[in-house]
Amino acid sequence: MESYEEISENTYLLNHSIGVENLYRDSFTNYKVKNARLNSILFEIHVPYDSKDENYGNQTSNKRKRLKTLKPFDETTQKILENHSLVNTQLRRNLNKNAANNKKALEFVDNFNACSNYDSERCFRGQNSSVHSVITEMDGESFIIPPSVTFINSSVDRFSEYIAQHNKFDLIVLDPPWWNKYIRRIKAVNAKSGYKMLTNADIKAIPLERHLHENTLVLVWCTNALSHIEAVSKDFFPKWGVELVGCWYWIKITSSGEPVCKFNEPQQKQPYERLFIGLPAESTMSTTFPRERFLYSVPSAIHSHKPPLYGT
């Protein structure tokens, strides 16, 4: 089963769950394990997170209500809103009229975080040099390691200790733990639910420029904060020696195709994230790489859990 579907030009509907399932299908050496998949409860996102807002879904209403007056959308938000309007019919094919809330998914993640023994501050590394996925145990928990993988769990300031300077990569993906108030609030309530954040200076200091060849793709997931957006294009990419060749948009939708929150004015919460794509200036791929794509998917209830992009 395909993990994505092209629903119009440059617009795709992704299935996060199937993407992961396809990756691990029939890849285990243990004959008792045929495949691995994410729990389907994670994707039971049936209603917008701000559905209690009586004006949701009717942003052009002229009715007089005691609501904050929205400022004009910025160019990016308006473009994504128009794209969503064009493909809304295709996105609503799986409409579930009986789904009332996201309670099961959110409770599942809360319980998972409460029970996990994973220590993000601990430094360790490992490798699976085989062509099969393996299951390993650590601190009383099971982990699946994909084939042909070397992994490192460490703070980014120790990057050069673990990555040899001569190592070059075809693809580098960064999903930085951007500094933001929301995660600080989460950590104040439950330390296991949050994570250590990085400043823009921390991210810029990563020596990616040492690990590029002429066609290395550099992908950076980015929030909608203007300071972060400008840092990628004006600070990070020039320092790393890459040029911006594309910006893709991941639009998070409910199981019935609605955005997980309403489209907002600049600097407010949005139902989408950006994926900046860079290539070295001398790259032969820069003129042919797709500069813009709209990627829709029902997001995992795990905070900031990105969908697989291979194949799109």
Image (tube, helix red, strand yellow):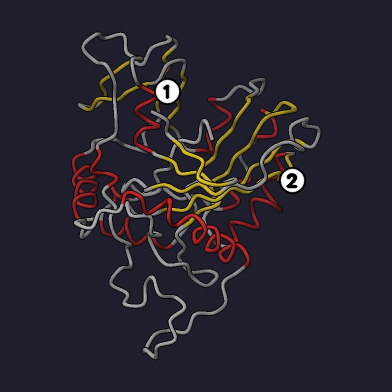
Q: CA distance from mark 2 to mark 1?
A: 30 Å
Against 202, is 127 above or below? Answer: above
| Residue under label 1 | 125
Between discs 2 and 1, the one toward the N terminus: 1
Residue type, mark 1 in image: Arg
The quarter holding residue 284 reads top right
- Towards the viewer: 8 or 294: 8
Circle 2: element type: helix
Picture residue at 31% right of the left edge, 36% below the top: 119
Q: Residue at x 36, y 33 (%)?
A: 18
Mark 1: secondary structure: strand
For the N terminus, give its image quadrant.
top left
Q: Residue at x 41, y 14 (%)?
A: 128
Q: Position of residue 142 (x, y in %)?
A: 25, 25
Residue 266 is situated, as x and y percent measured from the top left of the image, at: 55, 70
| Dot 1 crowding, Cα within 10 Å, few <14, some 14–19, many 20+ | few
